Amino acid sequence: MSTNTRTRYFSSWIVAVMATVAAAIGVPQATATPTQVHPEGSKLVVLGDSFAANGFRFWADAEECLHGPTSWPTQLSELMGVSGTADFRDESCSGAAINATVGYSLVREAINADKAGAFGPRTELVAVQIGLNDSWGDLHNTTLWGSLLPCVFNLTDGCGLEAAEQGRLTDFRGVSGAHYAERIREVVQYIRYYAPQARIVLVGYPEFFPPQKDSVCVTVLGVGAYVQPRGEGLIAYFDRIDAAQREAAALLDIEFFDTRRSTRGHGLCTDDPWLNGLVDPRADAFGIPFHPSAHGDSVVAQGLYERFGR
């Protein structure tokens, strides 16, 4: 991941903290997707962003999509008995968006999967988790990861509902099921044509903050929480993404996996978090901040397996 790309995700002080930790203990090695090609498609294919890939290395190239050894696709492939074989293809990539201006788009991931022979009559499950990195509004191109930390850590202005109109937060007002469905429609149609037996599943995002709250927070070092009392705009964005994915799945006649329901009560700053804070030992102390812990990913993998992978 290049310096410019890293900056989009973390403020400089977070990078410094994580780099120090990585140097001290070593960063877990990412798993590699098999390069073999199955002539009739892979049984399990995954497309998505960092919530699927969940792999990170400080000095990786921006074109290098790293897959964490405990990511939910990796764990799901193990449950399905296809790990390390040509029957598993993971094209998810950190920073990916449906309509990416930098990095990987959903179309590009689908093309890469197709070039690898992933889609075919033997394909059983195609799981897609994407959309959180996109720009949705008409007023500006602000994305979540470009505005998350500057907004959350802005004690003066916060992340209120007005932040979207002011360009300080991605514009949650532009998120809708119809808009989401239109953005992914061509890829869904492509998969449906070339993998006609596959179940296509839109995987939702986990619960970040408790419902019906105005404030947002993040645990630091496992000993305290930083609280942003004005978080209505950020919460509205997560709520609308969740609703849009559900609606889009219905509009496109594909399936939806309710990750938010599966992780309810285990978001940031809870007593038992399944998302990583900032060096929080209660989750993965050295995991990617704001992303699922290994246990959080295992819950998603198990849920997908029980519903779609048996």
Image: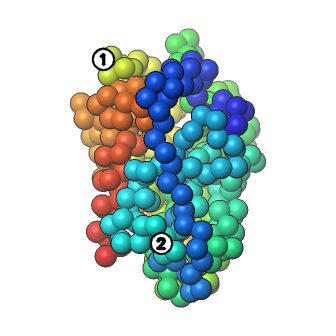
Identify the residue at horizontal 47%, vertical 72% (top origin): 85
User: Would you say residue 82 is visible in this rendering?
Assistant: yes
Q: Which disc is residue 269 wearing?
A: none
In the rendered image of this protein, does residue 31 appear above or below residue 289?
A: below
In the rendered image of this protein, does residue 277 appear above or below residue 93?
A: above
In the rendered image of this protein, does residue 206 appear above or below residue 179?
A: above
Mark 1 element type: loop
Mark 2 element type: loop
Q: Where, by quadrant of the figure, is residue 115 drawn?
A: bottom right
x and y percentages locating residue 4 in the rendered image: 72, 33
Tell me if mark 1 has few (under 14), some (14-19) or many (20+) residues whose alpha carbon lies within 10 angstroms of its own: few
x and y percentages locating residue 298 in the rendered image: 32, 53
x and y percentages locating residue 111 in the rendered image: 69, 69
Identify the residue at horizontal 56%, vertical 20% (top origin): 16
Q: Which disc is residue 223 wearing?
A: 1
Quarter holding the C terminus?
bottom left
Quarter holding the N terminus?
top right
Q: Which disc is residue 85 wearing?
A: 2
- Residue 73 shown left or right of residue 19 in the figure: left
In the rendered image of this protein, does residue 76 appear above or below residue 7?
A: below
Mark 1: which amino acid? Val
Outermost residue toward the left in this view = 271
Cα–Cα gap, marks 2 and 1: 42 Å
- Residue 119 shown left or right of residue 247 in the figure: right
Which of the pair 229/21 is nearer the observer? 21
Tell me if mark 2 has few (under 14), some (14-19) or many (20+) residues whose alpha carbon lies within 10 angstroms of its own: some
x and y percentages locating residue 306 in the rendered image: 28, 69
